[in-house]
Amino acid sequence: MNALQGSIEKAATLIEALPYIQKFRGKVAVVKYGGSTMVNDQEEDTVLKDIVFMASVGICPVIVHGGGPAINRRLEKQGVETQRINGLRVTDQATMDIVEDVLFGEVNAGIVRDIERVGGKAVGLSGKDTGILNVHKHWASTADGPVDIGFVGNVDRVCTEPIMDLIKGGMIPVIAPIGRGENGQSYNVNADTAAGEIAAALCAEKLVFLTDVTGIMRDPAVSSTLISTLHVLDVEDLIEEAVISGGMIPKVEACVKAVKSGVRKTHVVDGRLPHSMLLEIFTREGIGTEIVE
């Protein structure tokens, strides 16, 4: 009887997801995947299985990935010191060469391989080589004025055609956040920002950030302070109050821009939890923070 009851509960979960599957079929969902959510194989497999599930039920996932830990390991191995200004990596030509090789040659290729291993179909793209991310040089703002931090780019324009071609072909696009500047120069683009810009350009239904925290919380030490729904108009106040701080700021700012550009809902969820993305998107309660108009 216990086994039967367990099967009935599984069926009930599937039925609960049905209206969401029907609602989102044929819609684009951009997923920012990377950083601490890619630490070990178990977590990676869970996330990618969720993404393959989404594709299997007719949703069109697009992955934009980071790769900071992998880049740090390569730089350390090669004896290259890393300096950051305002949280952004100072990127000279030698560093940019390593960043590009790691992001596209290692991280991107690994994600594509793992998606295929769990039954999905994916194609890796560099934002530079396909002309997806067209950028200009970013200057860091400091108390002493603008500072040159090398080959770090701000997105001017997103070319969606290569992405849509893959979606129409039934593939999952996996995009490395490398931008193309003048004369074809490679630029390092913040992956959170890139995900938001791509979601906005695609007029995606959803933008999901997988993080290493539960969501946006008024007090990180108290789980009951999770903000389940956050409206765009309230974001600035929460940044001033330091409720939103550090690495969460570019994620939330990307969500705000995406929502203002027509993305219906954005989500910040804990990518370390098994199937967190499915729980947020396909259940009534959700488990993270949704940011809406």
Image (tube, rainbow, N blue to C red):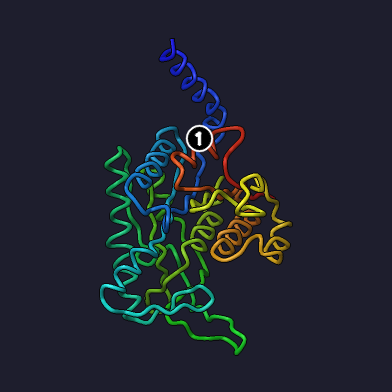
Q: Residues within 10 Å of mark 1 (few under 14, many from 20)?
A: some
Which quarter of the rendered picture does the N terminus lie within? top left
Name the side, left or right, on which 79 lies relative to 271.
left
Picture residue at 69% right of the left edge, 55% below the top: 232
Picture residue at 61% right of the left edge, 62% below the top: 253
Q: Is residue 240 above or below residue 51?
A: below
User: On the image, which quarter does residue 120 sit in?
Assistant: top left
Q: Is residue 25 above or below residue 75?
A: above
Where residue 122 appears, as percent x and y from the top left, is 33, 47
**How many marks are shown on the rendered structure?**
1
Where residue 23 appears, as percent x and y from the top left, is 57, 33
Q: Residue furthest bottom?
A: 144
Say which element carries label 1.
loop
Q: Is residue 182 above or below residue 53?
A: below
The residue labelled by disc 1 is 25
User: On the image, which quarter does residue 99 sit in?
Assistant: bottom left
User: On the image, which quarter does residue 171 sit in?
Assistant: top left
Name the side, left or right, on which 116 lies relative to 50.
left
Picture residue at 64% right of the left edge, 47% below the top: 226
Three-letter amino acid code at disc 1? Answer: Arg
Q: Nearer the viewer, residue 183 or 16?
A: 16
Name the side, left or right, on which 99 lies relative to 203.
left
Where residue 102 appears, as percent x and y from the top left, is 30, 65
Q: Nearer the viewer, residue 42 or 149?
A: 42
Picture residue at 27% right of the left edge, 41% below the top: 117
Q: Is residue 98 above or below residue 5?
A: below
Q: Residue furthest top?
A: 1
Where residue 284 appears, as percent x and y from the top left, is 61, 32
